[in-house]
Image (cartoon, grey):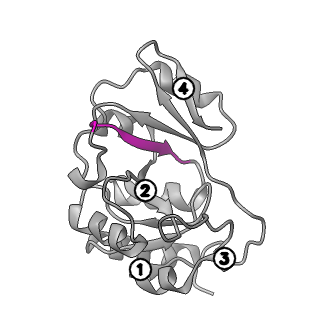
Amino acid sequence: MISFEKDIEHCLTVLRQGGTILYPTDTVWGIGCDATDPEAVEKIYRLKERPAAKAMIVLAADEKDILKYVANPDPRVFEFLKKTEKPTTVIYEGAIGLADNLIHEDGSIAIRIVHEKFCRSLLKRFRKPIVSTSANLSGEPSPAKFSEIFNHIRTGVDYVAHYRQEEEIPASPSSLIKWNNEGEPVIIRP
């Protein structure tokens, strides 16, 4: 079995070269790439057979990352997130500095701050946000564990992380909220 450190290093090498990875997140297994690289983002759209109009989630390590990639986020969102127990993705207005083909046509972007060991380590060392979209073809159910991921996805990425592949506990997607103009969350997916 490959070590945690080697797994992270392999992921970093692929991400820095504009490649795609299949990796465990704080929710379901994700397909990822450098969220600032439009060519890498396009590879994921093609692999998933997903229309470019369907936005994807971005993972970040800290609040400061949100401040770097979102124009004027409401600071109250950070207090809200500190009180949530379930991983929660927030749709922010005013995305900046990310690949254009990742940003929704209305200028918004969905970002989740992660605390899971593998993702957080990867993000901290990569120093950029990483795309995280479920490891499935567009329109198919999200796999709840690694063993449910289609071979087409496993062989279509440039690197498959080894960490947590053996876990049998089914995972579920994050909660999804949009922060409204009144400074309150609107729940899209509980």
Comparing labels 1 and 4, the label whose residue is closer to the camera: 4
Residue 113 belongs to the span the image colors magenta: yes
Q: Which residue is mark 2?
A: 123
CB under 8 Å between callouts 3 and 4? no
Q: Is residue 103 above or below residue 34?
A: above
Q: Residue at x 51, y 82 (%)?
A: 154
Judging by the rendered image, the residue that carries numbered circle 4 is: 186
Question: In the rendered view, would you say 75 is above or below 58?
Answer: above
Report the Cα–Cα distance between label 1 and label 4: 34 Å
Q: Nearer the viewer, mark 4 or mark 2?
A: 4
Of the residues under marks 1 and 4, which one precedes in the sequence? 1
**Kind of residue at badge 1:** Val
Image coords of residue 124 (percent x, y): 42, 54
Is 50 a magenta residue?
Answer: no
Q: Earlier in the sequence, mark 4 or mark 2?
A: 2
Counting from the top left corner in percent of width and height, residue 183 is at 47, 15
Q: Earlier in the sequence, mark 3 or mark 4?
A: 3
- How far apart, in angstroms, are the residues tagged by discs 3 and 4? 31 Å
Q: For the residue carrying disc 1, how many other residues have a C-alpha within 10 Å: few (<14), some (14-19), or many (20+)?
A: some
Distance (Cα) linking label 2 and label 3:
25 Å
Identify the image quadrant of the C terminus: top right
Q: Mark 1 — residue?
A: 157
Check residue 148 in the rendering and tell me which mark sits there, or answer none: 3
Q: Who is closer to the viewer here, 53 or 30?
A: 53
Q: Quadrant of the N terminus?
A: bottom right
Q: CA distance from mark 1 to mark 2?
A: 18 Å
